[in-house]
Every structure is written in C-alpha cells, then in structure tokens.
Image (cartoon, coloured by chain):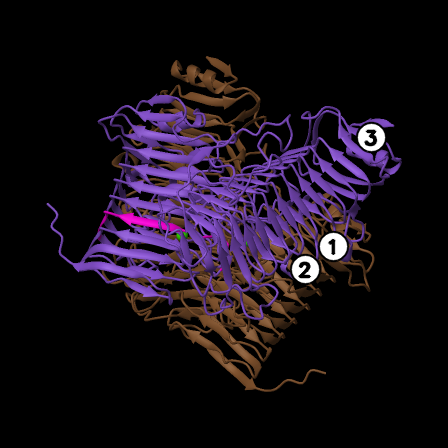
Chain colours: A purple, B brown
C-alpha cells in the first residue's frame, strides 16, 4: 500500500507496520529536525519504498538525518538542506553497529550545503555499511566542512566484500577545506585496507571537488572506478591503500585551473587503463599522473610499494606534470617494481619537462608511449610523434586519427552533468562574484557607509563619492560579497569607532579600492583592527582584495592590526596591492590562529605586491601552518616589489620579525627593500616546500633567518641603503 | 503637549518639532533595534520629557540605544534588555563629539543584562558628557562584558567642571570579568586626571559589583562619594588618579565573602572620612583600606604619591586586611607623606595581623585610632580598647557606646536596595544554582541521556539509574545549570560518538557525580574531549564541578582531552575531586586559550583534590595568564592529595610538563605524589604571586622548574618511591 505521513511520529508508526511492497510517502513541506529511522524488511521483488509526495517539494531541514536498516529498502526523492546533522552521518546505512542495511538503494536524493557551522567538526553525508547496496543518481553538493562526503565503511565482516554500486551521482562543488578530511569519496580505511571491498564506482560526475588533494581515497582491495568524470578538481583519484584496483575509462578535465590533478598510484596490482586527462596543471601529489614511492615493510597506515602496476592506453593532453617515484625520501625509498606503462599518450606542446623522476624508475617497463615532439623522453619506450588533435563531441581534444591504437577511447557511458544526479534540482553555481552587482553611490556622513553596506545585496559595489570623512560608530558586518571603492580621483577617508571596521562574516567577501582608512577615532583599547573575520567558525571560504588603499594612524593603543583573522576561518585568497601602511602598533596581518599543528592554516594564497610598510610595530606578515600533514599544499605566498621601513621593532611583536613564516609550503619573496627592519624568519617543515628569496635589498635590517632542514634558494640579497626621495 | 509615538520614525519626527514643556511618550511594547536620538532644547522651567506609556511596559531590545543632546531634557522609564548596542554606548549624553547634553536628566531607566555576545568587546551602558546632568534612580544590572558600566567623560572642556549628580542608582550584580575593564563607575581617564570634574556620587547602591578590583575608578579631581553602599563587592572604591577627592559616609558590607574590599587611596589631598566597613576579607589591592606607594615623578598613567591624605573617623569591623604602602616595589618607591590617620576604629577579634606595612610609614601621622585588644599596633597612635558591639537598624555591628567620638556614624541618607533604582523592576537574583531543581531518572539507552538533558530545566538533576552504557550519538548542549549523577551505589558508564560529550554553552553550568566516562566510541579523530565549553564567546561565567568520576580510554586518537575550553570563555570555578583519569592522549585540562597577554585568563578558581592521573600523554593541568596587568588577582589554584602516575610524556605535549603554570597568581600544591612523570613547571609573573609547594613526593619524576623572578616557597619535596597496592 501507499501511505502518506506528515510527522516524524507518523512516519515511525507507519514504518513499524510496513510490509513488502509498501510505499511510505513523506508529505510535501519542510520537515524540521526530522531524525528518521527507516528500519524494515522488504523482499527483492517487493521492496519497501520511502518516497515523497512530490520530488523537490519535500525537504529535511534543521537537525535532520536518516538511518536505513534492514533489507530491500528504497529511499528516493529526499532533499536535505538548511541545516546539518547533529550526529556523525546525515544518511547512514545502519541503525547502529549491530543492525545494518543490505540490498538497499538510495536514489534521487539531494544533500545541498547541509553543513555544520563548525568548519572542523567532522561529519559524513552518506555512510554506506552492509552489502549489495546501490547509491545512485543522488545530488551531493557544497560540503564545506571536515569529513568525507561519501564513505564506504568496511569496519565489520558484514560490510566487507560488499559489492556496492555507486553510480550516476552528481558530486557538486566542494570548496578547499585547507585541511585533511576534505575527500569526496573514500572506500575503507587504512585499518581495513587489506580487506576486499569490491565496490563499483561508475559514471559519477565530480564537479570541482576541491576539498583536499584526494578527491577519491581508495583504501581497500578490488574496487573499480569506471566512466567517472572529474571536472576541474584540485586533486587526484588516489589509490591510497589496498590492491587490485581497476581505474578504467575515467575523464579528468582541468581547464588549466591551478592544482587540477588526475590519478595517483600506490600499492600493488593496480590497473589504470583507458583514462583521459586534459589541461591538468597540478604537480607533486596532485600531478596528472603520479606513481609514488613506498615505504619498505610499510606499516599499514603508511605507503606500500607500487608493484605489478599496469598503466596502459591512457591519454594526457596539455597536462603539466607526470610524477614518477613521487614522495621519494628517506622513509619512502621503495621504488616501483614489476610495472608497465604502455600505449599511453602524453601530449603537451607547451611544456617540455612534463615528466619528473624522483628516484630509480628501472622497475617500470615503458613501452610504446607517444609524446609530443617537444617533450624529453625519460627512458626507452617513448615515441615522439606529432598528432593532429580535434575536438570530440564533448569538446575534448583527441587525436584526429581514430585508428590510433595508443591512448584512450572515451566511452559513451562517461558521466556528464546531465546524466548524473536528479533532473529536478538545479546544478547551477550558487556563489556570487565580487563586484558583479550594482553600483551604489554613498555620500559622506555619520554611518552612511554602514547603512549602505547593510542595505546592499551580494556583489554590490559601494562607491564613496566624496573625500569624506565617512565615520562609522558601528562595525560593518560583511555578510556577502561586497566592494567598497573611492570614486575615481578621490581617496575618501574612512573612520571608525568600534574595535573593527569590517567584520567579514560567514558568506562574506570583501574588495577595497582607493580608500584611506584612518584609525584616529578607534577606541582607546588594545586589539583593534580595520578588517576582521568572524570570531566564530566560518564554514564558507572568503576572499579579501585590497587595492590602492592607505591604512594610517592605527596607533591609539597597542596591538592594533590591519587584518585580524580568527580560528576556524579560511580565506581562499588575501591579496593586497599598491597599498600603504603607516603607524601601526600591531601586525599588518597575522594568519596564525590554527595552532593545533595538524596541517590546518588560515589562508591558501597570500599575495602582497607593490606595497609600502612604514613604522609597523608588529610584523607585516605572519603566516603559520603547523604539523606535518601532507593533505594540503598551501599556504602559498608571494611578496613582490614592496618596501619595509622600520617594521617589527615593537616589544610586543612576539614573532620578532618583519615577516614571520612557519610551515609555508610555497614562498616567493622578490624585489623588496627592507630598511631599519627586523628580519624575514622562515621555519620550513612539510614535504618539499618551494622557497625562493630573490633580489631583496637590506639596509640596517636583520638578515634572513631560516630554521628547519629543508632546501631553499636565496639569490641576490644585497646590503643597500635605499634612497627615498 | 503630550504626544505618543509608536515607531522610531514617529519619535524622530516628534522630537524635531518638540517645544519646551512637551512630553514625548513611547507606546507600550517592544521597540526592536530602536536607535533613538533625543536632540532638543527645553528650558529650566519647561524641560522636554521623553517618557513611556506605562513604566515597565516599554522595552528597547535588539540593537537599540539612545543619544541625548541639547538642553533641559528628561528621560524616564525606559528599559533596555534582550540585546546590546551596536555602538560603544547604550545611553550617551551626546549626539557626537560636537553636540553634547547639558542640564539633562536620566531617571528611572533600566538596563538589564544588555550584553554584547562578545565577552571582550568593549561598551559602556551610560556615558555622561556635558555639564550639570543628573543620573538618578536608574537600575543597571548584569553587565557581563568588557567596559565600564557608567562613565563620566572629561574629554573636552565642555565636559569638565561638570557638576554632575549621580544619585540613588541601583548598580546590580556585575560578575567577575576576569580582565581589566570591569569597573562599575569611572570618572575621567588618566589623560584628563589633572582636570577638575566636580561630580557628586551620592546614595548609590552597589550590589555585588565584582567585575574587577576597581568598583569605582576615580580618575579626576574634586569628586565626592557620599552615602553609597557597597554590598559584597570584590573590589574597592579606588582613587586611581586625580586629587582632592572626598569619600564620606560610605558603607562597605563584605559578609566575609572572598576578596571583598573597601577604599584604596592614591594621589594627593584625598579625604576619607566617616566610612564604615564590615566583614571585608580582601587583601593586596582589594584590602578593606589601602594606601598605596607612588612612583617618583610618575607619568600620568602610573601612580602618584599619596600626600596630604586625611583618613578620619572610619570604622572597620571584622575586616581582614589594611594595607599600607601597598604596591611597594622598585618602581613604586614613593611612600605616603604628610598624611594623617586619626580617630578610626579597626576592630577584628579574630585576626591579629590586620595591618600589613610594605614600606616606610613615617609620613603618616597616626592618632587616636582604636584597635581591638588582639591586634598588633604598627605605630604610635593606636589604642587597644575592647568595645561592646551591637547591631544597628541595618543589621550592621556598631559600637554600643553611641557617645564614642572615634569611628563613623552611618547617615540615614545611606543607600539601600529599596531607596535606589526603580520600584517597578525586580532586583531579584536571576541565577539558578546547580542541583536546585527536580530530579529526573534516566534509564540506559541510545541517546536517553541526550534526550533527558534536552528536556531538562535549569537546576535539574539527571539521575542515571542503571550501569548503562548510556551511548550518545549527539553532543549534549548544556545551556543551563545541569547535574548528572549516578544513582547511589552504581557508577553508570557513559559513551559518546561526537567530538565532545558535553558542550557547556552560554548560561550553562555542569556538575557530574559518580559516573564513568569511557571514550571507546569517540570518533577516530584528533582533538576530542569529554567536556567542552562553547567554541563561541560566553558572556556568562560558568561553573564545572566533577565529583567521584572516572574518565578512561580517551585514546582513540591523539590530543583527546578531558576538559577543553575556548577563547572568550570564563569559569568562576572548575573543581575536580575524588576522580580518576586513565589512558588520556591529550591533556586532562588546559586553560590557556587567552593568549593575547593582556591579563585575561580562562578560570578564576581551579581546585583539584584527591584525584589520580594515570598514563596521561599531555599535561594533567595547564593554566595560563599572560601579561602584567594588575586588575585581577586570579587564577587561583589548589592541588591537594593527588597522584600523578606517568603523566606528560607524549611527544605532542607541548607544555613538556605534568603541570604547567604561567602567570598564576596564587598557587597551593600540597600532599601529592608524582611517579614517572614530567615536572611541575611554573612561570611567575604578576605583582606578588603567592606560591606554596608543600609535602610533595617525587619518584622517577622531573623536579619542579620555576622561571620568572618572583619569590615562592617549597617545603618538604621528597624523593620517595610510592607503593601502590
Ligand atoms: Ca586525505
Ligand atoms: Ca581597572
């Protein structure tokens, strides 16, 4: 029978008496704080179905979740949004550790930005236990917080050799988490990685799944990945643990976006065939194709040696990095053995050094691989050949010669945005770019800027039309992307009386152009700042751009910073250009609130160009990443063409430096002048930090101090007294 | 005319055309986010009045505030509650720095717990600018956040020589802020402390104003404090800056509560006469009566020498500490001069050493002071005399001999709870004690404890009736005082699957008795804890009591703590007794999240008695207070009769100690055993920390390490191998 229910109590009452063939229908509307337990037993012919009155008109919100337990159950048509689960799993294929789901199906279900406000509180959206379950045609988009989006658990015998099928799911945008725990799909854990899983992952679409560098973390034996599409994902399909994986017929589209990757091979008996990659720019563990070194007699949670790998008939067009023996170091010294790389195409006419070889590759047999004529072969078995490329019906460049036996053929079972997920829920992007909205003119006056910001809409531009001053007795909460700029030709003065002027709240982003921020009205209190993040967790990443601004007189009391961030906040980018900072008692910016030393940090890209810093008590920049975790590759730092004049000498400057860097993974500091300033201090930690210090002039300033034992390069460090006119 | 208005727009429209003699009436109801500017000009005979339809039925809530500007205005009957001002001042006697209020009156207005959620975000409730203003019969209770409750500003000529009258106000409970900035009344700032203020503060009632050790901070010349009552206030009326203060006829009632104080004298020409104190226990800067040393040629923001002080006819009954030349150190070396202390009574039959003399008191002329016969005189001018004491009509002990010319007479103008504030708003205490509610029996079951806690009311007791296990898949939000205990004779097992079991949220307090907390179901993730504070700012202090509990198997991953606190949270007390901790990878408790080094810390009293700590990777305790601020006297620590067995050896233990103390101001560690453990590390910083380390036995453990240059005492540190049977 088909019975409709309208409350959680009715639902559980109806489930308790459900018979095979029954369908339980959730009534249209919002189900608030609905924790559903769907425990029942159908039959193969007559499953019990949990459905909805109308697809897209039933949503589970607030603190809702679903447990599925029993046999032959089907769940379809749910939408989870506007909330988060109070437990560890939004949808769980079990009631508890005793009662699992088998032969069940989760289909056409949506989980949309159903995120815990706490960025680093772990949860999982779909946790699959039991056996023979199918998870298909679901839409899982916008997971912003720590925890894998979908997990296959193997933590008891009843969940092993499971033969699950995961197909035609749409895995929507997952932003950079800036931490381990941002995987989109994981099968197994290191603890159960010797176990056979036998899960088939087929025809799923991964759309900008950028949580961390493992899009998929395979951690068990005998899984298969076929016909999946990875669109602009900044990571790889990683065979992290477990053997006998088949990776066949997948497509990786990078569109030359930074850090986009392909496939990473670890462990034994891995087969990688018929995959296609294009425009992948990632390097290190995020290369288009990566074979890692292993650890001799590896503990179960480290890296097993690659052996018996078969890598054949793959095509990589315009991909920048193929990394062989990646991760080679004192611990990871076991090179790949008994492996073959044959009949592949590596084609990139713009880059000659596509291959990086970190260790002995004699254990890999290279045969009949085509490379573009410009590429340097690294061994026998590479054939230079100019290919005619054409666009196929998907718009991907493929060899015009269809009779070519080398490289991949793209199956028509390949996942697309259209044939995955559900038809009745939008896959459109929800983010609004900065400066994409209307321009609002703002005249000077008490709180006129505050009021304009309060009334603005996402993407709007506030244009200050006079020289000001624009005084604000209230802090401006930046709750959406907002641009504030001076009208052409003026640099309006902005004053403020609260502890900070701009508070970037969750969902906010800020661009400042052509303004002069003067701290003279700030409260006589320590710890002021011009720009602050939320003091609370932000589960959405933010951006901050500062262009052609002055920040002056931030000296009413001690510890007055320009930019102040808090724990559990993360910026994709902080960019400051053509700006001037003068008379600041605190730090210009300190990104160092993630102090748990587990690889978390506050900003991915820090870009400082053409700025001048004068009479700064604290540091111009502190950037901190603690711990030795290898799941992320930031922060990235560039400092170019800047002047540091009397920076860092305040006795409260606990960094004892003008620029203090700890664990920063990529550093490029060039063409700067340091006068009467403290030093650049760097402590280098993780992996292989890429550090270049070039063309800097020091006058009456401390010299570069480096600790940690990583390599770095310094060129042209002059001792020159600058002349300022 | 009398005109009623119902919206902010109507109000401003009505104000714009107000004439002398008009009354503008706010309609009954809640005024949400009402920012009112009352700018008008009445006359002395015909003021313009802002009133309400019915007193007690009009409230300004959310983000509301009021500015008063102009002449001869009266504001009466407002209530601010359920919100906080988005600006720096709730009620301001000015429009902006140009337009002040003069000859205005604020009366019968209530501000009740109108607190910013951010504990350390500064604001002021009443800021008085201009001249000749009266602030009377207001009720200002429950200011929990940083910032002085009421300020008289002297920051321009127009606000000096102001002749303000502050009278008959009820200053309700202000909890310990644990930081500077918790004053209840301040007149002036150091910057304007050479300026004459001429403010009269008369007949006000200060009810448990415990924000910090300055209840009143006098910072300008020629102010008068008369007939005020200070009830159980943990601080003093402090003449911090400015000369020629008259402190006359005030009453200080300590009721033997800890840290209650009286009057502190600094600067020149201060007159302290006819004041009465009873049952004041405070010491150091919180003594019943304190005369400080000054700094020779003091900068304006330091301590001026006491000269020409007249201290006469005051009575101190059962007060524990009179401190002379307090604060004497290398900097504060200028002793009091040309001063007289005469005709006072210092009577305390229970304490012989009431007087502490820190430096040369020859500049004070003592004459005809009566002391109880047990007290040791410190100079000439003290007469031992047994007095008959009787209770007066206020219940205060006074000499039975009414003809006595020595000591204070209490005026009938003295403030009482009844003759201050308003009659139509309750002065009752709003806090609910732990374990004051009903007992609810809870049976074992999945989330039965979670559900019971969710349905509990403030003060309730949850009694777990079976041995359990009580498994919780959700974290328990402790949003009010809650007790959880095992039924007599059992020690129920409590398990949990989220990152923490109990989250003490703002307004919460927790008592745990007779339970066994087992971490075996906790997530395989770093950073778990059993008990956590809110991750967000808590503007209400909390309490945590643990009695007879076990905490075991907190080792599923690294950094598993027992108690974890966050920045911007503050406990009055954390007490752990008769409890056992075993197999913990992180810290048992680390109170060290206030790292700005401005004298803020996380817990006032830490009491650990009769506990055992076994196999603890991190520290059993870390307690941190950074900076050299002298506004607070905590944290206080007592560790007694505890066993530390293999504590502190994990490589992630960044404190490198079993007990790590930094800046703790009072330490008493006695009768403990340390076996195979790291050391106690102490760094001593502020003022005169009181440190006693007594009767501890160390076996195969590191020795006490002390840094900082303060004195401390160690007695009986044995090297004894304990025998555990
Ligand atoms: Ca990972
Ligand atoms: Ca103070």
The front one of A122 and A327 is A327
Q: Nearer the viewer, mark 3 or mark 1?
A: 1
The span shown in magenta is A629-645
The front one of B661 and B330 is B661
Chain of the residue on which disc 2 is drawn: A
Residue A28 against residue B701 in the figure, above or below: above
Figure disc tally: 3
First in residue order: circle 3 vs circle 1 = 3
Label 3, label 1: how far apart the Cα atoms are = 29 Å
Label 3, label 2: how far apart the Cα atoms are = 36 Å
Q: Report the disc number at residue A708.
A: none
Determine whether, in the image, residue B28 is placed left or right of residue B440: left
Determine whether, in the image, residue A549 is placed left or right of residue B428: left
Q: Which residue is mark 1?
A: A160
Q: Is residue A642 magenta?
A: yes
Q: Which residue is mark 2?
A: A192
Residue A502 drawn at (x, y percent): 39, 37
Residue shown at 56%/86% (left/top)? Answer: B719
Tag 2: Cα neighbours inside 10 Å, few (<14), some, or many (≥20)?
many
Task: Give residue A115's quadrant in the image.
Answer: top right
Residue A20 against residue B317 in the figure, above or below: above
First in residue order: circle 3 vs circle 2 = 3
Label 1, label 2: how far apart the Cα atoms are = 9 Å
Tag 1: Cα neighbours inside 10 Å, few (<14), some, or many (≥20)?
many
Pointer 1 with pointer 2, Cβ within 8 A: yes
Q: Which residue is mark 3?
A: A23
Q: Nearer the viewer, mark 3 or mark 2?
A: 2
Pointer 3 with pointer 1, Cβ within 8 A: no
């Amino acid at each position: 029978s088909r019975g409709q229910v309208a409350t959680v109590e009715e639902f559980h009452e109806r489930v308790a008496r459900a018979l095979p063939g029954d369908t339980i229908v959730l009534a249209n509307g919002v189900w608030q704080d609905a924790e559903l337990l769907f425990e029942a037993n159908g039959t193969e012919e007559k499953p019990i179905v949990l459905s909805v009155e109308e697809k897209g008109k039933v949503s589970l919100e607030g603190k809702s979740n679903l447990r599925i337990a029993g046999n032959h159950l089907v769940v379809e048509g749910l939408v989870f949004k506007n909330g988060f689960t109070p437990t560890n799993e939004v949808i769980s294929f079990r009631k508890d550790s005793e009662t699992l789901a088998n032969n069940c199906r989760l289909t056409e279900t949506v989980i949309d930005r159903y995120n815990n406000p706490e960025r680093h509180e772990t949860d999982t959206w779909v946790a699959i236990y039991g056996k023979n379950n199918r998870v298909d045609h679901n839409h899982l988009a916008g997971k912003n917080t720590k925890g894998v989006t979908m997990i296959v658990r193997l933590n008891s015998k009843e969940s092993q050799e499971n033969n699950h099928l995961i197909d035609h799911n749409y895995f929507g945008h997952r932003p950079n988490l800036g931490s381990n725990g941002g995987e989109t799909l994981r099968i197994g854990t290191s603890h159960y990685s010797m176990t056979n899983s036998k899960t088939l992952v087929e025809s799923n679409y991964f759309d900008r799944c950028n949580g961390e560098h493992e899009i998929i973390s395979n951690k068990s034996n005998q899984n298969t990945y076929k016909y999946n599409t990875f669109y602009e994902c900044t990571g790889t399909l990683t065979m992290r643990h477990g053997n006998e994986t088949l990776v066949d017929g997948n497509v990786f589209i990078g569109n030359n976006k930074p850090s986009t990757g392909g496939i990473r091979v670890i462990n034994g008996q891995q087969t990688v065939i018929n995959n296609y990659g294009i425009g992948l720019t990632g390097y290190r563990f995020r290369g288009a194709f990566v074979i890692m070194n292993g650890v001799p007699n590896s503990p179960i949670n480290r890296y097993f040696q690659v052996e018996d790998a078969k890598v054949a008939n793959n095509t990589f067009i315009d991909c920048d990095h193929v990394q062989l023996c990646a991760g080679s170091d004192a611990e990871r010294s076991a090179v790949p053995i008994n492996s073959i790389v044959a009949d592949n195409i590596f084609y990139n006419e713009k880059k000659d050094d596509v291959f990086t070889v970190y260790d002995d590759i004699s254990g890999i047999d290279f045969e009949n691989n085509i490379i573009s004529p410009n590429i340097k072969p690294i061994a026998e078995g590479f054939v230079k050949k100019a290919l005619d490329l054409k666009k196929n019906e998907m718009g991907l460049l493929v060899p015009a010669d269809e009779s070519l036996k080398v490289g991949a053929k793209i199956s028509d079972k390949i996942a697309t945005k259209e044939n995955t997920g559900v038809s009745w829920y939008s896959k459109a992007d929800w983010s609004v770019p900065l400066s994409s909205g209307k321009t609002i003119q703002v005249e000077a006056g008490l709180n006129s800027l505050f009021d304009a910001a309060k009334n603005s809409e996402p993407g709007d531009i506030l244009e200050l039309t006079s020289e000001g001053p624009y005084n604000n007795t209230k802090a401006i909460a930046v709750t959406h992307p907002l641009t504030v700029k001076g009208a052409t030709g003026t640099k309006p003065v902005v004053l403020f009386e609260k502890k900070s002027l701009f508070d970037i709240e969750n969902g906010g982003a800020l661009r400042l152009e052509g303004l002069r921020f003067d701290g003279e009205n700030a409260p006589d209190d320590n710890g002021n700042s011009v720009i602050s993040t939320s003091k609370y967790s932000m589960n959405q990443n933010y951006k901050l751009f500062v262009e052609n601004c002055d920040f002056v007189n931030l000296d009413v009391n001690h510890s007055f910073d320009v930019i102040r961030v808090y724990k559990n906040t993360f910026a994709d980018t902080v960019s400051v250009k053509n700006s001037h900072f003068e008379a600041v008692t605190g730090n210009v910016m300190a990104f160092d609130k993630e102090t748990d030393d587990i690889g978390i940090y506050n900003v991915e890209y820090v870009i400082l160009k053409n700025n001048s810093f004068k009479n700064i008590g604290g540091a111009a920049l502190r950037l901190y990443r603690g711990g030795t975790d290898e799941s992320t590759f930031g922060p990235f730092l560039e400092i170019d063409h800047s002047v540091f004049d009397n920076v860092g000498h305040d006795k409260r400057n606990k960094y004892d430096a003008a620029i203090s860097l700890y664990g920063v993974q990529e550093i490029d500091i060039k063409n700067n002048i340091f006068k009467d300033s403290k030093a650049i201090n760097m402590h280098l930690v993780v992996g292989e930090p890429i550090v270049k210090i070039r063309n800097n002039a020091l006058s009456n300033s401390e010299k570069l101090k480096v600790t940690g034992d990583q390599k770095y390069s310094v060129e042209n460090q002059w001792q020159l007294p600058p002349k300022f006119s």
